[in-house]
């Protein structure tokens, strides 16, 4: 047992990271059943967009209840800390966050993954509601980690530039940020960004983390709703072929297809991040590629370690390989 497995009451200190559109009840339950902790992300289990906050909450309620029919193990729900309100990041708007939080409380989900800029009032509020709080800053800093600890957070995620999805604005890799954050707090830290196998997991522990927070590697899990063509794209693309471009909130990485190439070129030409975020269609860009399977008109956003991902496997196989027989 280590601090993370103890706090979350799980077998292995592996948290499946929330990923817009592709972290449905089936994936979450499969991760939790395999001994890690699954997390329902924004749009979990959905195929269509809703802009109605009540509908957003009710959709999450359905996914929470479905997860409970598939596992009796702990899981969590992603809560976006309200912050930037603009066209490229409207999921950070408080109307959606409030709706999700209401459902988390009503459905008595004990664990929450709070993501966004540090806000001590929000963390204290989540703690006062009796939740176990895992806090992830989009841009981890010593100051925000200390504030999260002081506000009562239970676990901190230290995310490096290697990650998939919307990336940090600071180009600090996982190997650097994990020990920096781990040294700054006494609550446990889990490492995020580019961890896809047993070597990455072991390295995270050596760097001072007490667990890992994994997104991209679970995109190719059998139980993940990622489109098959997108899973194959991850398996067939080398890390060196990935495109990096600027869009809201900071940077995105994509496999090289039509829209990604276009956004990359525009980014190189200095087109504004707001304009690029619009062309990317916000979180619709990843949905079109990753859920609908249209690689040319969407964005397959992944981490920098995809060369190491070679096959589609179950969550159980991914997790067991990652921990390499180690007991916690
Ligand atoms: C396709 C994709 C979508 C993501 N969407 C979200 C999201 O909706 N909310 C969030 O907090 N993080 C999101 N992330 C970031 C992950 O939660 C996590 O920080 C990241 O995947 C960890 O790095 P890794 O991909 O190298 O494992 C996303 C990541 C990916 C790959």
Image (cartoon, rainbow, N blue to C red):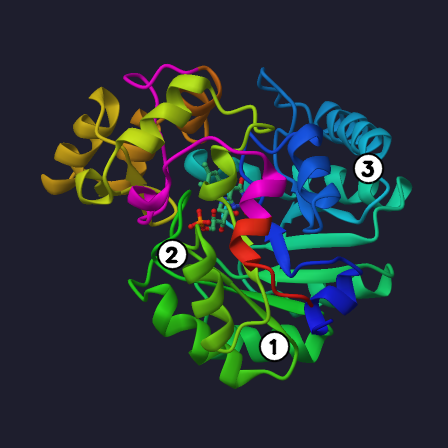
Mark 1 element type: helix
Mark 3 element type: loop
Residue 27's spot in the image, x, y percent?
64, 33
Residue located at (71% from left, 50% from top): 35
Position of 84 compared to 261: left or right? right
Disc number placed over residue 55 in the picture, else none: none
Mark earlier in primary sequence (1, 2): 1
Q: Residues within 10 Å of mark 1 (few under 14, many from 20)?
A: some
Q: In the rendered view, tell whether residue 142 sits above or below residue 123.
A: below
Report which quarter residue 150 is drawn in: bottom right
Residue 316 lies in magenta, yes or no?
A: yes
**Residue at which label 3 appears:** 71
Residue 5 lies in magenta, yes or no?
A: no
Mark 2 element type: loop
Q: Is mark 1 within 8 Å of ligand 1?
A: no
**Figure quadrant of the C terminus:** bottom right
Q: In the rendered view, tell whether residue 126 sits above or below residue 220.
A: below
Position of 245 compared to 79: left or right? left
Mark 2 or 3: in front is 3
Residue 236 vs residue 248, the one in the foreground? 236
Residue 246 vs residue 312, the one in the foreground? 312
- The residue segment tinted magenta is 293-319
Gap between marks 2 and 3, in whole Å? Answer: 33 Å
Determine contact: label 2, label 3, CB under 8 Å. Answer: no
**Residue at which label 2 appears:** 168
Residue 257's spot in the image, x, y percent?
23, 24
Residue located at (69% from left, 36% from top): 30
Gap between marks 1 and 2, in whole Å? Answer: 19 Å
Report which quarter residue 134 is drawn in: bottom right
Determine contact: label 1, label 2, CB under 8 Å. Answer: no
Mark 1 or 2: in front is 2
């Amino acid at each position: 047992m280590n601090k993370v497995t103890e706090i979350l009451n799980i077998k292995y200190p592996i948290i499946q990271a929330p990923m817009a559109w592709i972290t449905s009840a089936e994936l979450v339950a499969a991760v939790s059943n395999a001994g890690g902790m699954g997390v329902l992300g924004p749009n979990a289990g959905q195929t269509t967009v809703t802009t109605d906050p009540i509908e957003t909450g009710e959709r999450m309620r359905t996914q929470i209840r479905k997860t409970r029919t598939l596992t009796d193990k702990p899981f969590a729900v992603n809560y976006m800390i309200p912050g930037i309100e603009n066209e490229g990041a409207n999921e950070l708007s408080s109307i959606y966050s409030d709706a999700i939080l209401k459902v988390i409380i009503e459905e008595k989900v004990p664990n929450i993954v709070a993501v966004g800029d540090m806000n001590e009032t929000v963390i204290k509020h989540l703690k006062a509601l009796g939740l176990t709080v895992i806090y992830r800053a989009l841009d981890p800093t010593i100051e925000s980690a200390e504030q999260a600890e002081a506000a009562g957070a239970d676990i901190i995620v230290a995310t490096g530039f290697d990650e998939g999805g919307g990336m940090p604005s600071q180009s600090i890799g996982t190997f650097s940020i994990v020990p920096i954050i781990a040294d700054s707090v006494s609550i446990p830290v889990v490492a995020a960004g580019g961890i896809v196998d047993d070597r990455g997991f072991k390295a995270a522990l050596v760097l001072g983390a007490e667990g890992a927070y994994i997104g991209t590697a679970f995109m190719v899990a059998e139980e993940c709703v990622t489109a098959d063509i997108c899973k194959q794209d991850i398996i067939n693309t080398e890390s060196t072929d990935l495109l990096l471009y600027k869009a809201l909130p900071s940077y995105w990485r994509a496999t090289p297809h039509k829209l990604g190439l276009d956004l990359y070129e525009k980014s190189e030409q200095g087109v504004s991040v707001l304009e690029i975020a619009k062309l990317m269609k916000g979180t619709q860009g990843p949905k079109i590629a990753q859920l609908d399977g249209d690689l040319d008109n969407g964005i397959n956003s992944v981490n920098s370690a995809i060369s190491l991902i070679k096959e589609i496997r179950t969550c159980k196989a991914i997790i067991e390989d990652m921990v390499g027989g180690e007991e916690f």
